[in-house]
Image: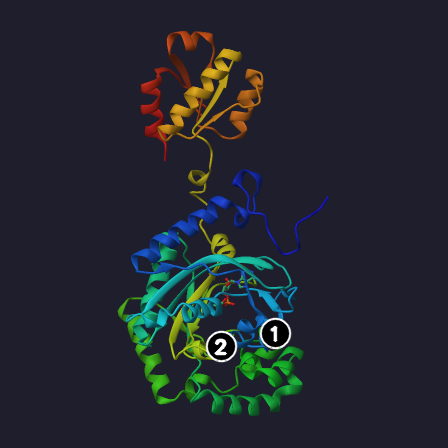
Amino acid sequence: MIKRVRGTQDILPARFTDKVDAQIERRNLVERTARDAFRRYGFEEIRTPIIERTELFERGVGTETDVNKEMYTFEDRDGERVSLRPEQTASVVRAYIEHGMFNQPGLVKLYYIGPQFRRERPQKGRYRQFSQIGVEVLGQSDDASIEAEVIEMLEWYLKALRIDGTVLQINSIGDENCRPAYIERLRETIRQQLPNLCGSCNQRYETNPLRVLDCKVESCQPYLNELPSIADSLCEPCRTHFEQFKGLLEERGISYTIAPRLVRGLDYYTRTAFEIIGDKLGAQNTIVGGGRYDGLSQMLGGPPTKGFGFALGIERLIMSLPEDGAENLKQAPLLFIAYIGALARIHAFALAKRLREAGISTIVDLEGRKLKKSLAVANSLSARYSLIIGDDEIEKGSYVLRNMATGEQRNSGEQDLIATLRNDER
Ligand code: HAM
């Protein structure tokens, strides 16, 4: 038997899987709710290709980042290097430049929903193919109200999904004016601690010292807590921006904690960095990650453009949904039609078509099963009603409609049937 690739998932109707993040109904719920929330805030949808030139991510995400090292990259037949996208911000900014969206007078507010690929070690909440919902705000303004509004929208979205127990963590990681001096200071302090730090810290010290702050290894923590904080090294404009951002969150009643060591794992960030942490997830507990990336457009050869956005992992979001309420997400058909005999079969098909035209989800036995077996199928599908057609029913033009859960039965003609079922359709 050929099995699926490690770290990937089949997304199935809920009746085939207990793994909540593999259930299509929950995916549809979070995607539908996102579209609704984002529409209210004036975001437009964008879809970009799953494959991009490798160079896009090398320039955007950075060659020394984990995300870049985890990319699925291959050489196409014409020798061009292409990669499965590990994230979508770089793709959205590429599309923004390529389609001249910067010619618009105002901010361009885009959202996307789709699969991403990273060759990580799979574990709970971590896959090699996973899905993100993300938004990006692009344009000439870096007003902190952009950050505040996007985070307000996120809070609204999480509330609509009844997800609670999350924590918003924020930080500022400075910009090209203040960060280089900070990194020098940081490198200097880390150097003195190198023998005490783990292998990955030692490596990051060489390639990307900022990421040392991100290390989760227990034995490193006491040393990392002693490192200089980036917030204390911000230049005046970055400090003002951060103060404004915090003030705007407070104005909106959004609570946050400052995470001085939050630096994020992609090279394009400037100033604002944030994450939303869930309480139902174990080690992979970051549901949302985002930040400002004012230099990314230029890194990709585009015009100077400011940007801010986030992406959330759909799998982690789904694992954070409340347990209850999943019942009404099921895709069960409303009505199952069984029949006895060849004439009734023809009648059943015609009736089913009329009911479907009336908006009622209907399944007819296509396999010509015996009545008992047919009803067993209705049961396994969790159909809410069933109806059996025989010679009698055809003659009288009246059917016995059975509520599968209660066993209650009633006689109805076609119009009554439609009225009753319509009433029951979600
Ligand atoms: P990121 O932090 O790399 O940011 O990913 C965002 C979210 O995607 C994570 O918080 C997590 O929920 C989910 N995620 C990442 N890797 C995996 C994985 N292997 N399995 C399951 N879920 C995963 C970005 O991707 C940026 N593009 C976010 C952004 C948008 N920044 C500005 N705009």
Q: Residues within 10 Å of mark 2 (few under 14, many from 20)?
A: many
What secondary structure is found at the residue carrying circle 2? Answer: loop
Instruction: Nearest to the eye among marks 1 and 2: give it.
Output: 2
The CA distance from mark 1 to mark 2 is 16 Å
Q: Please name the residue that numbered disc 2 is placed on.
A: 263
- Residue at point 63% right, 56% down? 7
- Does any atom of ligand 1 lie closer than 8 Å to the CB of label 1? no
Q: In the picture provided, is 186 more to the left or to the right than 259?
A: right
**Percent coordinates x, y for residue 322 in the rendering:** 44, 49
**Would residue 278 be visible to someone looking at this image?**
no
Please say if 238 is above or below 387: below
Q: Nearer the viewer, residue 11 or 222?
A: 11
- Residue at point 29% right, 66% down? 253
Q: Residues within 10 Å of mark 1 (few under 14, many from 20)?
A: few
**Percent coordinates x, y for residue 8 in the rendering:** 61, 54
What secondary structure is found at the residue carrying circle 1? Answer: loop
**Would residue 360 be visible to someone looking at this image?**
yes
Q: Which disc number belongs to residue 217?
A: 1
Q: Residue furthest left?
A: 251
Q: Which disc number belongs to residue 52?
A: none
